[in-house]
Amino acid sequence: MDDMKNGRRIRVLVVDDSSLVRKTLTEILASDPDIEVMGAAPDPYAAASIIRESIPDVMTLDIEMPKMDGLTFLQKIMNQKPIPVVICSSLAESGSETALKALEYGAVDIITKPQLGTKRFLEEAKIRICDAVKAAALVKSYHTPQNRQVAPKLSADAVIAKGSILRVLETTDKVVVVGASTGGTEALRVFLEALPMDAPGMVVVQHMPEHFTASFAQRLDRDCRVSVKEAQDNDTVLRGRVLIAPGNLHTLLKLSGARYYVQVQDGPLVSRHRPSVDVLFRSAARYAGRNALGVIMTGMGDDGASGMGELKEAGAYTIAQDEATCVVFGMPQEAIKRGGVQKILPLEEIAGEVLRKCRS
């Protein structure tokens, strides 16, 4: 990892049984000046041969393959010689339980296989794939790479203008907004499982592929005392309920009378993401103000950093996950640097602090 900080490109091994997918992924990754495709393999056995000769920084891995499926190979890799793995599978399109299991087995992230589509679709797919690989390369290094060339990114202005903060009466019922990315699926599980069934209403943005958030929410709902569901437009934010922003759609907090609800909508990538943490946090700053509590967790980049500052300015209480418990410290680190964080805590202590502040 030290070599990457000194400018060495991230070496990626692509593993997929489709020659077309291997070619497409290779072209997408090779188009990024920070990434080098060091090999492509049609199955896990061929991949293992390449790894014996030279260990990649990151491996992209399909799940459905001949000779050995991707999940079995993932388990073997993690038991023998752990490598940051990004699952690249069509199963992510349906948010399957199989794809979700890959995260439990040690995969860093899951992305949808690139397909032919509109110019916007292909451009956004390239951003997501390259960003996922870069995030994987940072796992356990906790350092933001220097001098990286990135595509121009939009701020939350593209979806919701900053405007003035509404004058809202402070209430005993707080609204908690949470943002996470790489490593966030496990972090959110730990956080949400620690909450009682009458926890304050929450809205969560976790960077995930489209459709995948529904399965993620269902799994959390089975394991947690709070109710967890994928957010739908006009869903009310209720005590004991957690709303997960759907993949590929922005989710905003809104206020109607005394009712907080969510607005789910399309829009451009903001901070290179859709849904964007900055969009959620800005809307919470405007419509909830001091009634809000913001939490930013593990993830690469700076999505949510500006929004945390706006939440703090609006009177909300803000918490960041600490470096030691983050898979990638990028998002919390950037929010801390910009002065938007009031409390930095290990993952295991965040739920307790949220409950304490919401009750005080």
Image (tube, helix red, strand yellow):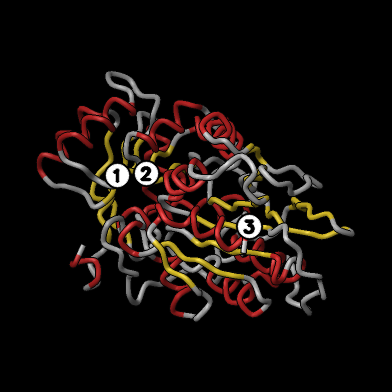
- In the picture shown, does residue 152 fall above or below 244? below
Residue placed under numbered mark 3 in the picture: 176
The Cα–Cα distance between marks 2 and 3, rounded to whole angstroms, is 30 Å
Residue 313 locus on image (x, y percent): 64, 80
Left or right: residue 25 versus residue 205 is left
- Name the one closer to the observer, 328 or 110: 328
Q: For the residue marked with disc 3, what is the amino acid?
A: Val
- Name the one closer to the observer, 126 or 350: 350
Report helix, strand or loop for mark 3: strand
Q: As drawn, which residue projects farthest toward the front?
A: 360
Residue placed under numbered mark 2 in the picture: 86
The Cα–Cα distance between marks 2 and 1, rounded to whole angstroms, is 6 Å
Left or right: residue 128 versus residue 176 is left
Rate crowding at label 1 as few (under 14), some (14 to 19) or many (20 or more) other CA atoms within 10 Å. Answer: many
Q: Quadrant of residue 280?
A: bottom right
Q: Quadrant of the N terminus?
A: bottom left
- Name the one closer to the observer, 238 or 162: 238
Q: Which residue is at 62% across, 64% downward?
A: 360
Q: As drawn, which residue projects farthest toward the right?
A: 257
Residue 192 locus on image (x, y percent): 52, 44
User: Looking at the image, do the residues carrying marks 2 and 3 touch, with CB atoms under 8 Å apart?
Assistant: no
Left or right: residue 17 versus residue 357 is left
Q: Which residue is at 32% across, 75% downward?
A: 146
Q: Which residue is at 42% across, 37% downward?
A: 21
Q: For the residue marked with disc 1, what is the amino acid?
A: Met
Report helix, strand or loop for mark 2: strand
Q: Quadrant of residue 174?
A: bottom right
Residue placed under numbered mark 1 in the picture: 59
Q: For the residue marked with disc 2, what is the amino acid?
A: Val
User: Looking at the image, do the residues carrying marks 2 and 1 touch, with CB atoms under 8 Å apart?
Assistant: yes
Rate crowding at label 3 as few (under 14), some (14 to 19) or many (20 or more) other CA atoms within 10 Å. Answer: many
